[in-house]
Image: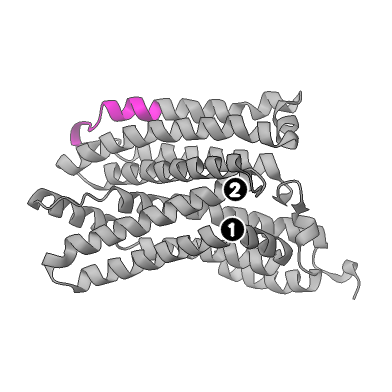
């Protein structure tokens, strides 16, 4: 069977599956990001008010947190099946942080389920475990992002930057998690969430700025892509919009809560747009590379027969 008999060409299939994988990663970062953020923000002090706050925070993510992780499974599954060469190279470089992330996800699941089945006196202990699992997961994901941006280089600079990237991603998850709590809670807990959202938003803004400055410096191709005229004039709109949204959210939170809890949903929506802008910037920086400077989606794609077979399943599964 020659390539003309396929539904699409091999390159088109590679683009389709890369787009589905990118979409899955973005949705995961937003959806599991907010429940990881809520987990990191859970207070563990031993007093009645903190106990009530913890119950409210857990209840706010209870119906969603487990399903949100499905998007990560989908993204990794597509990487494995559609781009096996890239999957092998990525997880060879990221074996240890991936293992730590999986341990964190397992700890979160165990803590969440055991909390609902244990006596009330043990809830605080399981909340600590849930918080630790959430933090492990967020830090390891941020570390992996830092390693990816720097091209998986084994240098002291790369490790330091990846650790800082881990802190930045954890801050970003706290940012969207706190915005979720602003939308879903009220009273004293909502006021705490407003302060958490302001503080984590400022840390996140610094982290985004740092990545935006370092990424073009360590990747010459990224520098050319972002700063060559005339496309630079259009691309610069992304960081400008992102910075503007950080400022708008910060100023909006400074005046919350409004009467009758109006606009409590707006910070969460704006933070989602910030996540989208940051992810869009990463895609623009590296497309069509799956491994920066080494392997593209076209070079690492599976055989067209396999991609066409999986395409029919994706049409059903993804929606």
Q: Is residue 64 magenta?
A: no
Q: What residue did someone put label 1 on?
A: 94
- Which residue is drawn at the image coordinates 31% and 54% (left, top)? 39
Residue 267 image position (x, y, % from top left): 36, 37
**Tag 1 near tag 2, CB within 8 Å:** yes
- Tell me if 204 is positioned left or right of 10 in this view: left
Residue 195 image position (x, y, % from top left): 26, 34
**Mark 2 element type:** helix
Q: Which disc, if any, is residue 106?
A: none
> Dot 2: few (<14), some (14–19), or many (≥20) neighbours within 10 Å?
many
Report which quarter residue 128 is drawn in.
bottom left
Examine the rendered structure and indicate whether residue 189 appears above or below residue 58.
Answer: above
Sooner in the amino-acid sequence: mark 1 or mark 2: 1
Magenta residues span: 248-260
- Which residue is drawn at the image coordinates 53% and 28% (left, top)? 241
Mark 1 and mark 2: Cα distance apart in space: 8 Å
> Dot 1: few (<14), some (14–19), or many (≥20) neighbours within 10 Å?
some
Q: What residue did someone put label 2 on?
A: 147
Nearest to the observer: residue 181 or residue 135: 135
Report which quarter residue 308 is drawn in.
bottom right
Examine the rendered structure and indicate whether residue 23 appears above or below residue 257.
Answer: below
The N terminus, quarter of image: bottom right
- Which residue is drawn at the image coordinates 49% and 55% (left, top)? 28
The C terminus, quarter of image: bottom right
**Mark 1 element type:** loop
Residue 141 image position (x, y, % from top left): 50, 53
- Tell me if 73 is positioned left or right of 248 in this view: right
């Amino acid at each position: 069977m020659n390539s003309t008999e396929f539904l699409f060409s091999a390159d088109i299939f590679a683009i389709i599956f890369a787009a589905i994988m990118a979409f899955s990663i973005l949705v995961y970062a937003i959806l599991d990001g907010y429940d990881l953020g809520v987990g990191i923000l859970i207070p563990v002090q031993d007093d009645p008010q903190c106990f009530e706050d913890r119950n409210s925070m857990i209840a706010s993510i209870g119906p969603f947190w487990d399903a949100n992780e499905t998007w990560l499974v989908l993204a990794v599954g597509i990487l494995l099946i559609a781009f096996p060469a890239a999957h092998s190279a990525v997880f060879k470089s990221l074996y240890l942080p991936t293992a730590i992330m999986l341990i964190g996800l397992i700890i979160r699941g165990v803590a969440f389920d055991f909390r609902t089945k244990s006596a009330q006196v043990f809830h605080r202990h399981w909340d600590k475990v849930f918080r630790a699992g959430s933090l492990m997961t967020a830090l390891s994901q941020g570390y992996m992002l830092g390693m990816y941006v720097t091209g998986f280089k084994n240098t002291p600079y790369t490790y330091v930057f990846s650790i800082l990237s881990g802190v930045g991603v954890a801050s970003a998850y706290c940012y969207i998690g706190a915005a979720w709590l602003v939308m879903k809670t009220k009273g004293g807990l909502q006021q705490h969430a407003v302060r958490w959202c302001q503080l984590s938003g400022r840390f996140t803004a610094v982290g985004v700025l740092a990545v935006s400055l370092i990424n073009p410096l360590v990747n010459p191709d990224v520098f050319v892509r972002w700063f060559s005229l005339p496309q630079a004039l259009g691309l610069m709109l992304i960081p400008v919009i992102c910075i503007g949204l950080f400022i708008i959210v910060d100023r909006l939170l400074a005046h919350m809560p409004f009467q009758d809890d109006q606009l409590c949903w707006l910070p969460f929506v704006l933070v989602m747009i910030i996540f989208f802008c940051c992810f869009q910037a990463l895609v623009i920086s590296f497309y069509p590379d799956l491994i920066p400077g080494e392997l593209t989606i076209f070079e690492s794609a599976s055989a067209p027969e396999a991609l066409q077979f999986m395409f029919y399943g994706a049409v059903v599964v993804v929606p």
